[in-house]
Image (cartoon, coloured by chain):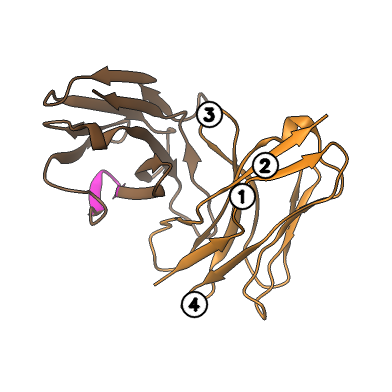
Amino acid sequence: GNSVTQMEGPVTLSEEAFLTINCTYTATGYPSLFWYVQYPGEGLQLLLKATKADDKGSNKGFEATYRKETTSFHLEKGSVQVSDSAVYFCALTEPGSNYKLTFGKGTLLTVNP
Amino acid sequence: DAGVIQSPRHEVTEMGQEVTLRCKPISGHDYLFWYRQTMMRGLELLIYFNNNVPIDDSGMPEDRFSAKMPNASFSTLKIQPSEPRDSAVYFCASGRDRVNTEAFFGQGTRLTVV
């Protein structure tokens, strides 16, 4: 079956530091890949997505590249802000799965001023 | 669009009571998902609907849980009787029936069973 593995948190950084959150996946076909963000007390929001190999998703300074050869979709940001403090989820859907999302366990990011 | 609307935002109930969680999906969306989030298990898909029809309820933990979608704009998740281990945040999400689409989440219902 499908699965998503994220780096364990929590991750604590200082403002303006570089962020990487690793994500790898297992799928039988060619999935679409997503990063969702959950701010405290809120639901999940789509941060970015990529739908085929070598696609780069980007939003709000965050980027992730769909790497089929390494089955990875690592999230990066060059300079984090305090407002980026949240839980980040990597997820996938696979064609034929009726758009059911498979999530990783989430990574808590705390950015200190 | 107001987004996915869930009610109530918080629910505290006593063990053994019936709990009903409500969800209004985004208009025009074909899929509706119910997820449960806990520290131990993360995000778990409980059940999802396509065009108001339940497609996969294999994630529903036991017979105490039931979900309905009587029309395209409303769904309920019911727990009867509730138990302390049901305490969690329950999310509803909806999405369109097209390739590479994403799901849109509500703000969740935080359920506490005491």
Residue at the spot x=13%, y=23% of the render?
B17
Asked if badges 1 and 4 are on one and the same chain, I answer yes
Label 1: chain letter? A
The secondary structure that most of the magenta stretch takes on is strand
Q: How busy is the neighbourhood of tag 1: few (under 14 within 10 Å), some, or many (20 plus)?
A: some
Label 2: chain letter? A
Q: Is residue B85 left or right of residue A32?
A: left
Q: Which residue is mark 2?
A: A109
Q: Looking at the colours in the rendered structure, which chain would you say is drawn in orange?
A: A
Q: Is residue A2 left or right of residue B56?
A: right
Residue at the far bottom: name it: A69
Q: Amino acid at mark 1?
A: Gly
Q: Which residue is mark 3?
A: A42
Q: Which residue is mark 1?
A: A9
Q: Is residue A85 left or right of residue A40?
A: right
Q: Quadrant of the N terminus of chain A?
A: bottom left
Q: Amino acid at mark 2?
A: Leu
User: Which residues, given as a range, are shown in magenta?
Assistant: B47-55
Asked if badges 2 and 3 are on one and the same chain, I answer yes
Q: Amino acid at mark 4?
A: Gly
Q: Quadrant of the C terminus of chain A?
A: top right
